[in-house]
Every structure is written in C-alpha cells, then in structure tokens.
Amino acid sequence: MKKIRKLTAVLLAAVMLMTISSFSAGAMTVVRDGKEYTLETHTPTTGDVHVLMVRLGFADYGVDDAKYPAVSEQTLLSYFDGSEDSVNAYYEVSSYGQFHLHCDEVFTYTAPLERAEYDSQNRSASSSPEGLIAESLTSLKDQIDFDKYDSNNDGYLDVVCFNYAGPTGAWNSTWWPYVDSADITVENTKIEKYAFLKEGAGTMKHEFDHIFGAPDYYSYSNTHEAAIATFDMMCNSSSDHNGFTKWLFGWLSNDDIAYVSKATGDTTVSLAPFETSLGDGKKIAVVAPAIDEQTPLLSEYFIVEYDTGTANNK
Ligand SMILES: [Zn+2]
C-alpha cells in the first residue's frame, strides 16, 4: 500500500529547504537559510532513556481506589515489557533500533488534599498540578535516583509520567491525558514537561511524542488545513511516525531522504520499504509541487513513503 502524506508546510519546509541540522546539548536545532528552529525538548530520542513513573493518589481517591484506581504497577510495567503493543517495542521498531525506552520501577505518592484542590484553575497556587508534581517528587526523593532519569545529564528529567487515581475529567481539564510544560526544580533537577495520564499504552506513545518535541498533526479546528491526511501517531494516535517526525527525532538522516522539487522536473524515485531496517535505500521522498519563493513556509509539501503494512503500520 502506498501512502501519500500531505502536510501543510511549516513543518515540511524545514525538511525541504533546510541546509544544516544540528543536535545541540539538550535541544535539537534545525538551521535553515540561516535561521534557527529549535525543537523544544530536553529529552534524547536515541539511546537508552528511563521513564520516571509515579502513581498519584489523593485524600479522596487513593491509588487503589475501589472504583477509580490509578493504573496498577504491574500494568504500567507491562507497557514496557517489549511485547507487541508495548510502548518500548513501538519506539524500538519506529526508530530502527536506535531508541530504547525503559520503565522498570514505579513510584507511588498519596497527596494530603482532595484531588479537586489540584485542578488547573489553581495553577498559580502551591496546590496546582505543578505544586503537586514538586510535592510528590520531593517526598519521593530518597527513593528516586534522579541521575538515572536524566540520561543526557543536562539537568532535566527526560520523561516524567504521572498516572492518577479518580475519574477522567472533561477534555482539556486537569484530569485528561496530556503533556504540559512546567518550571519545577527538585533536588537540583529540572522538570520542563510532564505527562498526566490515565491509562493505555497507545495514549502514552502519543503523549510521550510531545515530550520528545513532536506537535499534533491533527486539526484543532476540524478544517484539516493544518493537519495531515493519513494515519499517524500524532494525527490519530495510530500507526507509525511519519518520515518527517523520524527525521526530527534523529532516526532518519538526510541521506535517507530523496528530495524532489519543481526544478527536478520529471523524475523517478525508488523508495525502500518504510518499516524495515535502514541501509536499503531512501525511506521517504519529499515533494514540493510548487514552492512559493516569497513565502516558502506557506507552501504545501508532500511526503511519499512506501508502506508495506508491517511492523507499526500493520
Ligand atoms: Zn497530542
């Protein structure tokens, strides 16, 4: 099956017109036409990274609440057991074996207040979600080896994930699955982003991608003008990452990409199967049907991949 992935251009222009890409300490910077575009993350997307996983309970909903418990430790660990639908197997395959995500211990914290006290309308107060995170990690500091969770030693925890007790709230509420920015320091270690989740390995993959710096590729306004028109982990939380995300995460290099523009004229591009290991040819073709030289970032681009319906694209 051949998929054509169509994206509006702010993102793809970086692929098409980029001249240099670099990976500075803690952040990925794309330099294109002399301008720097920084992917906001302090989390590496290659090598070994450990997820700091915390179960959160409250005065009114304990972690093992009869009706609304946090996800059990056993289940959370099973998301990283390497089995077919696990979180770590997904990244292992998508990264062509370059990114190893681990979670081999789960911490538990029970807050003294009722859950509503930590709602996001309290963000400026000490009982906001940020206050809750600082309070929980401070309380757990003697149990947590913070160095283990900062694999690139940049002073920021790589992936911090909280799984809370209590019912799921409304969309965009504090108790909805999401990743948010933070400015927290615990034990001389900073937390810049955190995941607040209920359950599901699939949700975890999508939300972790935000921690790794990927944006949503679905339209918030349902117009689809700012969305891609295909299956993708950052579009509908299914399937593999598209080639652009893999390039951002450092799993595809410039050598894995075929560039086709108007100037190329009629051309034939051979693509290797997208899902299989690297080294067998170009993985994606980036096609610009019409580059507007004056406003290249407003142009439209296509990514073409040869998807064989295996691995994460089954
Ligand atoms: Zn998202």
Image: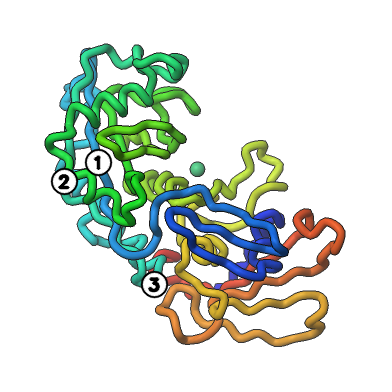
Crowd class of label 2 (few under 14; some 14 to 19; many from 20; radius 10 Å) = some
Q: Earlier in the sequence, mark 1 or mark 2?
A: 1
When the figure is inspected, residue 229 is found, relative to residue 293, above or below; the finding is above
Report how far apart the C-alphas of labels 1 and 2 lie in the structure: 7 Å
Work out whether 294 lies above or below 156: below
How far, Cα to Cα, is label 2 from label 3? Answer: 25 Å
Disc 1 and disc 2 in contact, CB within 8 angstroms? yes
Q: Quadrant of the N terminus?
A: bottom right
Q: CA distance from mark 3 to mark 1?
A: 25 Å
Where residue 220 appears, as percent x and y from the top left, is: 62, 38
Image-based side of 155 in relation to 23, left or right: left
Secondary structure of residue under mark 2: loop
For marks 2 and 3 on the same chain, the one whose residue lies earlier in the sequence: 3
How crowded is the residue under tag 3: few (<14 C-alpha within 10 Å), some, or many (20+)?
A: some
Q: Is mark 3 within 8 Å of ligand 1?
A: no
Q: Which structural element holds mark 3?
A: loop
Query: In this orientation, does residue 86 appear?
Result: no
Helix, strand or loop status at disc 1: strand
In the foreground, 289 or 109: 109
Q: Amino acid at mark 1?
A: Met
Few, some or many residues within 10 Å of mark 1 (<14, 14–19, 20+): many
The residue identified by callout 3 is: 96
Q: Is residue 168 visible?
A: yes
Comes first in the chain, label 3 or label 1 = 1
Q: Label 3 sits on what residue type?
A: Tyr
Q: Where does label 1 land, which residue?
A: 53
The residue tagged 2 is 105
x, y percent for residue 14:
66, 62
At 63% from the left edge and 71% from the top edge, which residue is drawn?
A: 304
